[in-house]
């Protein structure tokens, strides 16, 4: 009986740690009500409406197919705002390794489409690595913009 209690306690601790790690990583994932291509197009349009420039679409499934491998749809949309990013890059050149922003539109094995992106809390830790001071107002504004754009794409 004592072993069962210890096992239950250990399981709770492990699950709590896993949940905390997942939340601490800052990855936001939202299911989409649309197919992958429609979700990508809707996300691109929503980001453009919010002042972002789309730099690229990185199609991982197409890349896999080019070498004879198969995977579900997985496309990274790369986007940003040079008016905001360039001044940071001028002061902190190495920060450019982390920007522009990205969102992943992906399908699971059952064909369910989702959109994933990093929230700004995650970016705050990365920013510190490059000496970029946190700007809570800008971070909150960016989180609201990204959240609204992804909601517009997925609902």
Image (cartoon, grey):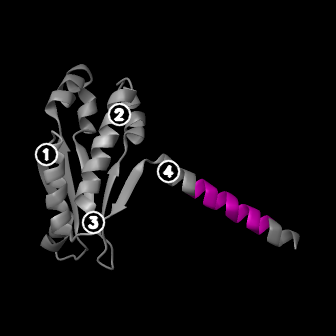
Say whether residue 45 is left or right of residue 92.
Answer: left
Q: Secondary structure at mark 2?
A: helix
Crowd band around label 4 with a 10 angstrom C-alpha radius: few (<14), some (14–19), many (20+): few
Q: What residue appears at the point 50 percent right and 46 percent down from the top-left corner?
A: 24
- Residue 86 quadrant: top left
Confirm whether residue 63 shows in the render: no
As drawn, the label of residue 48 is 1
Quadrant location of the N terminus in the rendered image? bottom right
Q: Are marks 3 and 2 in contact (CB under 8 Å)?
A: no
Which badge, 1 or 2, is on the more N-terminal residue? Answer: 1
Which badge, 2 or 4, is on the more N-terminal residue? Answer: 4
Q: Magenta-highlighted stretch: main secondary structure? A: helix
Q: What residue appears at the point 17 percent right and 58 percent down from the top-left corner?
A: 42
Judging by the rendered image, the residue that carries numbered circle 4 is 23
Q: What residue appears at the point 34 percent right and 41 percent down from the top-left corner?
A: 143
Residue 13 forms part of the magenta stretch: yes
Q: Is residue 10 above or below residue 80?
A: below
Crowd band around label 3 with a 10 angstrom C-alpha radius: few (<14), some (14–19), many (20+): many
Tell which residue pokes out farthest to the right in this image. 1
- Residue 66 quadrant: bottom left
Mark 1 → mark 3, Cα distance in angstroms: 20 Å
Which badge, 4 or 3, is on the more N-terminal residue? Answer: 4
Numbered range of the magenta stretch: 6-18
Q: Secondary structure at mark 4?
A: helix
Q: Are marks 4 and 1 in contact (CB under 8 Å)?
A: no
As drawn, the label of residue 106 is 3
Confirm whether residue 75 shows in the render: yes
Camera-side mark, 3 or 2: 2
Which badge, 1 or 3, is on the more N-terminal residue? Answer: 1
């Amino acid at each position: 009986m004592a072993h069962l209690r210890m096992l239950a306690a250990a399981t709770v601790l492990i699950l709590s740690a896993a949940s905390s790690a997942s939340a601490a990583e800052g990855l936001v994932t939202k299911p989409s009500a649309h197919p992958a291509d429609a979700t990508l197009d809707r996300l691109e349009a929503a980001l453009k409406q919010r002042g972002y420039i789309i730099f690229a679409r990185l199609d991982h499934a197409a890349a896999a197919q080019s070498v004879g491998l198969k995977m579900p749809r997985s496309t990274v949309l790369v986007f940003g705002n040079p008016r905001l990013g360039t001044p940071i890059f001028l002061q902190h050149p190495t920060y450019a390794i982390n920007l522009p922003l990205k969102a992943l539109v992906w399908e699971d094995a059952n064909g369910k489409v989702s959109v994933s992106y990093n929230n700004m809390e995650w970016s705050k830790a990365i920013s510190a690595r490059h000496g970029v001071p946190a700007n809570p107002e800008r971070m909150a504004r960016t989180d609201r913009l990204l959240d609204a754009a992804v909601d517009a794409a997925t609902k």
